[in-house]
Image: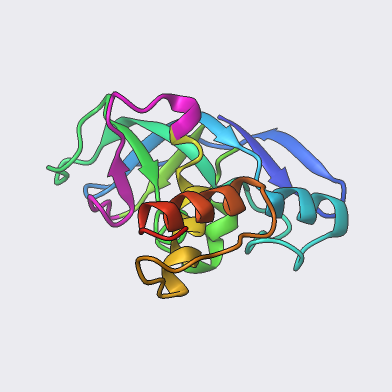
């Protein structure tokens, strides 16, 4: 399979890696569409330690929508063809690899796959382009909720990038002006 490996500042290697080996409790997903995060750009331009848990020599990318292409014999929650969002922090079973999930690779092994933990179903009404933005929108929504806003309060969001926009949308949804 094709995979993009981060090899250091301004160094990305497009290479061939072996296909993931499916275990009885695992799922293999194929990436449909990936977004480029500000963390990806920071690490590319400035090196490891400047972005979201992206280490030299690993696959990278963590904003994506994928499709299930193989399920282990013991897996009951997923079937081939399901469109899913892999949660970067838990999808690989290693929280240190959140930014190195493999969004810029063809396939990813999801060990011990659990619904609504490592993988979430993406409804048909959500396009692939929008679904690839689930991760940054969860970041913005979490930030908004951590402010413990109360209905009727006012808020200002500085920065209208994807995460700032997500925070503003979440605040509005929560009843904040």
**Camera-nearest residue between 16 and 60:** 60
Q: Residue at x 51, y 40 (%)?
A: 133
Residue 157 visible in the picture: yes
Q: Residue at x 65, y 53 (%)?
A: 58
Q: Is residue 152 left or right of residue 73?
A: right
Q: Is residue 168 left or right of residue 157?
A: left
Q: Position of residue 14 (x, y in %)?
A: 72, 33
- As displayed, is residue 50 above or below residue 133? below
- As displayed, is residue 42 above or below residue 80? below
Q: Residue at x 40, y 54 (%)?
A: 91
Does residue 115 belong to the magenta stretch?
A: yes
Does residue 123 belong to the magenta stretch?
A: yes
Farthest front residue?
Answer: 152
Q: Is residue 118 left or right of residue 44?
A: left
- As displayed, is residue 154 above or below residue 167? below
**Camera-nearest residue between 116 and 95:** 116
Q: Position of residue 129 (x, y in %)?
A: 50, 27
Q: Is residue 25 left or right of residue 122?
A: left
Q: Residue at x 27, y 51 (%)?
A: 113
Snapshot quadrant of residue 96: bottom right
Q: Please say which color scheme the image uses.
A: rainbow
Q: Position of residue 33 (x, y in %)?
A: 52, 28
In the image, the segment drawn in magenta is 112-130
The dominant secondary structure in magenta is: loop
- On-image quarter of the N terminus: top right
Residue 105 visible in the picture: no
Snapshot quadrant of residue 68: top left
Q: Position of residue 167 (x, y in %)?
A: 52, 56
């Amino acid at each position: 399979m094709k995979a993009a490996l981060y090899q250091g500042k301004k160094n990305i290697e497009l290479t061939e890696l072996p296909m993931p080996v499916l275990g009885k409790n695992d799922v293999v997903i194929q990436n449909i569409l990936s977004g480029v995060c500000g963390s990806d750009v920071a690490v590319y331009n400035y090196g490891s330690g400047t972005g979201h848990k992206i280490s030299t020599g690993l696959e990278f990318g963590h904003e994506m929508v994928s499709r299930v292409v193989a399920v282990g014999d013991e897996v009951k929650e997923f079937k081939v063809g399901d469109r899913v969002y892999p949660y970067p922090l838990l999808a690989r079973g290693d929280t240190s690899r959140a930014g190195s999930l493999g969004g810029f690779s063809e396939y990813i092994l999801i060990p011990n796959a659990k619904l609504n933990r490592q993988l979430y179903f993406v409804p048909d009404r959500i396009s692939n382009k929008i679904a690839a933005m689930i991760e940054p929108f969860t970041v913005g929504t979490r930030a908004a909720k951590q402010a413990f806003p109360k209905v009727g309060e006012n808020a200002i969001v500085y920065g209208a990038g994807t995460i700032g926009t997500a925070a503003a949308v979440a605040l509005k949804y929560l009843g904040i002006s």
